[in-house]
Amino acid sequence: MKWSLEGKWIAGGFGLTLLLMGLISLTSYKNTAELIESADRVQHTYEVLNTLTDFYASMTVAESGRREYIFSGNQQELERHQIAVGNMQSKIRTLQQQMRDNPIEQQRLTMLNSLATQRLALFKESMALYQRDQSAVLAQALITERSVKLRGKIQSVLADIKATEERLLRIWIEQSRSSIHYKILIEFIVTILNFVVFFGVYFLLYSQWRQRQKVETLQRTLVQEKELSDLKSRFFSMVSHEFRTPLSVILVSSQLLGEILQDLVDKSHLKNLYRIQSSAKLMNQLLIDILTLTRAEAGKLEYKPELLDVEAFCLNLVEDIQFFDMTHHSLKFISNSRCVRVKLDEKLLYSILSNLLFNAIKYSPKGGEIYLILRCEVGAIFFQVKDEGIGIPPEDRQEIYEPFYRGQNVDNITGTGLGLAVVKKCLELHQGDITVESKVGAGTTFTVRIPHKIYDK
């Protein structure tokens, strides 16, 4: 059978199209395999960098817990120290696993492990000394000095490891970029040729190329957003822990000073000292709110429900809040039903109710009445915080649970706009909800509903 000229051109064009498609398929496969390999290397390097950051953060927390424990003897700080020590050891093991194929980094890890072991031994020696003799200040200072020197050496090793990993990260990213550029160039050339041969093939390939570009852009955006979120979470966590240590020192020192001066001076002269204590506690609560919010956004906020005497909890909370209140509002607790034991997370519940009560105090006139109302029903428990304050304008009520958002009528009242955002995040873990009723100039009532079983015994 003889082929016509048109048939020959069609067959030739079809064959050329198949050949080009075969070549592009082979090239794309090779480039895709290289991209996957580079992506795996980039991911591995990010994991190493994150582990290094987590190790240093754990070491910082361990040191902070040790200082707080030998300063105040608080068992919770001892537990925090022990948890951080466990995290340090876990991160060392993780780093050894992540760098098992790198002999140079293994040597650095060996040195890091040795330095970390020496510092942990100093921590243990310091706390043992504190348990034997709490007045051994000079010995504790010498231990702290040795610990600081070891910390400097550990930071140096961490910096070397980090510098190496960042250099590798730049190499892998550059290789990925080159592979992507090469892949795009080949696909563009083949697309142009296929356009000449067959418009439909060109249109299909072009559409696929455009789709891939969108997917790659979306993936890069998601990776950047995740990195930013993780960085923000680690930053706020570290800052919160570092600030809480000096705040604790201020608070404990002022309390000790108050106890010393209580019988020596007139009580009216201790007013400023009490203000220092109250302000330190408020700042500590602010740091707790920031840490709670960042942990919630990162999905790391813990939910540990336990049986709780909710009426006793509310009475203690009202007493605590009344101590903070420097403008002397009338804060009252009302229980409309008998609630003995409810399974709730005490820390999260404290954040929910304390933030609502602090807001009520902040936005109410001096001497105004504020109510915390408790009501238990089958399958749910209700808390109401009612005030006679400035109220919330209707146009603000959909936005008040967003971080840093504040109503239009707050004027010069100081605040951060974090309280209701923290309340919302804590309620989500309880699977609860919150509603608000408010009238500008007359007051606001927040109603919190938490579904849960009630235990009578």
Image (tube, rainbow, N blue to C red):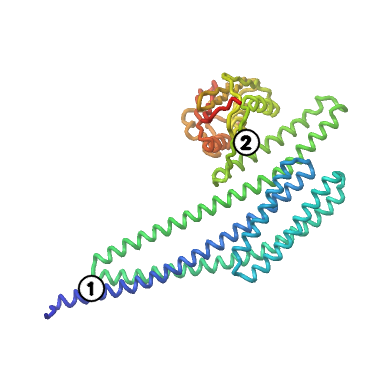
Residue drawn 67% across and 63% down? 159
Q: Nearer the viewer, residue 250 or 384?
A: 384
Residue at the spot x=81%, y=49% of the render?
Answer: 128
Q: Is residue 395 above or below residue 136?
A: above
The residue to which callout 2 is attached is: 347
Q: Quadrant of residue 375?
A: top right
- Farthest residue to the bottom: give it: 2
The percent coordinates of residue 410 (x first, y second) are 57, 30
Residue 58 percent location from the top left of the image: 67, 52
Asked if residue 155 is positioned above or below residue 60 in the image, the reply reads below
Whether residue 180 is visible to the viewer of this picture, yes or no, is yes
10 Å crowding of disc 1: few (<14), some (14-19), many (20+): some
* Residue 353 percent across, percent down from the top left: 60, 30
Under circle 1, the secondary element is helix
Marks 2 and 1, the one that precedes in the sequence: 1
| Of residues 354 and 224, the one drawn nearer to the viewer in this rendering | 354
What residue is shown at x 76% (from left), y 30% (from top)? 274
How many numbered markers are drawn?
2
The residue most toward the left is 1
The one nearer the camera, 452 or 141, is 452
Residue 155 shown left or right of residue 406 in the figure: right
* Residue position marked by numbered label 1 in the rendering: 14
Q: Is residue 411 visible?
A: no
Check disc 2 and report its element: helix, strand or loop: helix
| Distance CA(mark 2)–CA(mark 1) | 71 Å
For the residue pair 273 and 294, the one nearer the viewer reads as 294
Residue type, mark 1 in image = Phe
Q: Residue furthest front?
A: 457
Quarter of the image that includes the C terminus? top right
Which corner quadrant holds the N terminus?
Answer: bottom left
Residue 316's spot in the image, x, y percent?
A: 67, 27
Q: Amino acid at mark 2?
A: Lys
